Image (cartoon, rainbow, N blue to C red):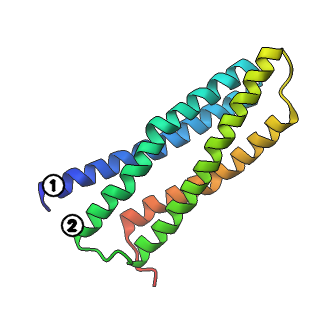
Amino acid sequence: MSDAYLWVKWIHVLSSTLLFGTGLGTAFHLYATHLRGDVAAIASAARNTTLADWLFIATSGIVQPVSGVILIRTAGYGYLESWLAVTYVLYVIAAACWIRVVALQYRVRALAEAAVADASPLPPEYFSAMRLWFILGWPAFIALVLIFALMVVKPVLW
């Protein structure tokens, strides 16, 4: 393996770690804050979670396919090998869930900030948004775990 390949591989692994770790960490932070019910803390956690999503997940989400294509080409894999084809589908699922989750985080933040400003309880819409946010986190999480497994094992699936 060339030095360039190993550097790209390092970037790919690092960005996948940032994507997965930030996603898991911010999801835990927002959900744990939600469970405590402190409206001001929820507004703050939603604000920080959304910021972290843009700083770390969005940038890593771009680096992943770019570095992945370089690695596929350099290592000599076929772009449509079965394990790669499945990773593409899983990545699209994770990305689609993430896009909706970020929109929900903006809504949760706005609802929490409005409740703080009005000194009122969180509205039912907040709880609906958080329920959907929680539900959508699972397919994204599972998809990324499966992608990690496929990247390491590289099984022939068909």
Is residue 38 something that shows in the picture?
A: no
Kind of residue at badge 2: Thr
Q: Secondary structure at mark 1?
A: helix
Q: Position of residue 89 (x, y in %)?
A: 52, 68
Q: Is residue 41 left or right of residue 14?
A: right
Q: Position of residue 134 (x, y in %)?
A: 70, 45
Label annotation for residue 74 = 2
| Residue wearing tag 1 | 4
In the image, is residue 67 above or below residue 15?
A: below
Which image quarter holds the C terminus?
bottom left
In the image, is residue 13 above or below residue 75?
A: above
Label 2: few (<14), some or many (≥20) within 10 Å?
some
Which image quarter holds the N terminus?
bottom left
Label 1: few (<14), some or many (≥20) within 10 Å?
few
In the image, is residue 143 above or below residue 116?
A: below
Q: Position of residue 87 (x, y in %)?
A: 46, 66
Q: Position of residue 63 (x, y in %)?
A: 36, 50
Mark 1 touching mark 2, by CB under 8 A?
A: yes
Q: Is residue 28 left or right of residue 88?
A: right
